[in-house]
């Protein structure tokens, strides 16, 4: 008996909903722990999930596809700028401490992103969107890994590594926001139902 591959559209929606829920909880925890890397990754997760949900609207409405694409990119960019400023402040005025809750939450984020990366690889359907989803989930897995490293090494780095991790994640999220908002490969238009 052969197991049926999940449809990528369902995997993408599930990824967005899970990312939104986990990201919201992780954002609240990041505020409590004070971890810049965790905050950057958590806010990116929430806004990334909102962007995925907005992108889903481009599949059914050509009239508003560019608007949804621009809103999604703007949301990610706004979060990246906010967390970037927070990370700079953390780097300039470091507080060296081990944050076990932040580390545990980010290890969870690595696991969640890795799970959806694997699930995207195993899915079927929408070849172009699937390839983008695989790339995106892989990128998010690595960004969460950067947060893990920053948090884990913070105490031995004199409080600098968490701020550096947050800044790196914020910079990567800003680049991703540009890719979403200014899609030059017709990704949005290619998925719109005429």
Image (spheres, helix red, strand yellow):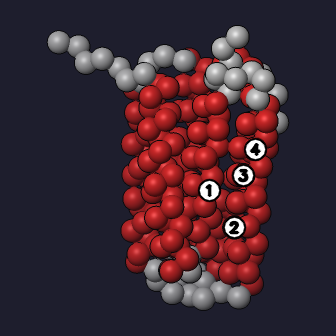
Instruction: Say which residue appears at 50% left-offset and 33% top-offset.
Output: 12
- x and y percent of residue 98 in the render? 46, 83
The residue carrying mark 2 is 83
From the viewer's perspective, tell me whether residue 91 is left or right of residue 66: left
The residue carrying mark 3 is 75
Instruction: Say which residue appears at 49% left-offset and 35% top-offset.
Output: 13
Tag 4–tag 3 contact (CB < 8 Å):
yes
Q: Is residue 192 visible?
A: yes
157 w.r.t. 191: above or below: below
Tag 1–tag 2 contact (CB < 8 Å):
yes
Determine the CA span between mark 1 and mark 4: 15 Å
Question: Crowding near pointer 1: few (<14 within 10 Å), some, many (20+)?
Answer: many
- x and y percent of residue 172 in the render? 70, 53
Observer-nearest residue: 175 or 51? 51
Find residue 146 and report its image quarter: bottom right
Question: Which tag, 2 or 4, sits closer to the chain's start?
Answer: 4
Determine the CA span between mark 2 and mark 4: 18 Å
Question: Crowding near pointer 4: few (<14 within 10 Å), some, many (20+)?
Answer: some
Front of the two marks 2 and 4: 4
Name the element at disc 4: helix
The residue carrying mark 1 is 44
Determine the CA span between mark 1 and mark 3: 9 Å
Q: Is residue 121 visible?
A: no
Question: Which tag, 1 or 3, sits closer to the chain's start?
Answer: 1
Tag 1–tag 3 contact (CB < 8 Å):
no
Question: Crowding near pointer 3: few (<14 within 10 Å), some, many (20+)?
Answer: some
Instruction: Say which residue appears at 76% left-offset and 54% top-offset.
Output: 77
From the viewer's perspective, tell me whether residue 133 is left or right of residue 98: right
The residue carrying mark 4 is 71
């Amino acid at each position: 008996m052969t197991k049926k591959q999940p449809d990528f559209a369902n995997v993408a929606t599930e990824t967005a909903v899970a990312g939104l829920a986990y990201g919201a909880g992780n954002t609240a925890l990041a505020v409590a722990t004070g971890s810049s890397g965790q905050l950057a990754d958590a806010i990116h997760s929430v806004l990334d999930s909102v962007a995925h949900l907005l992108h889903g609207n481009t599949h059914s409405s050509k009239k508003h596809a560019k608007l949804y694409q621009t809103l999604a990119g703007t949301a990610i960019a706004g979060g990246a700028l906010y967390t970037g400023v927070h990370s700079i402040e953390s780097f300039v005025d470091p507080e060296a401490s081990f944050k076990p809750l932040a580390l545990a939450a980010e290890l969870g984020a690595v696991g969640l992103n890795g799970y959806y990366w694997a699930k995207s690889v195993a899915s079927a359907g929408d070849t172009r969107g699937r390839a983008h989803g695989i790339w995106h989930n892989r990128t998010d897995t690595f960004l969460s890994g950067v947060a893990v490293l920053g948090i884990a090494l913070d105490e031995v780095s004199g409080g600098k590594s968490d701020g550096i991790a947050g800044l790196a994640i914020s910079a990567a999220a800003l680049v991703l926001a540009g890719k979403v908002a200014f899609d030059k490969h017709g990704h949005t238009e290619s998925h719109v139902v005429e």
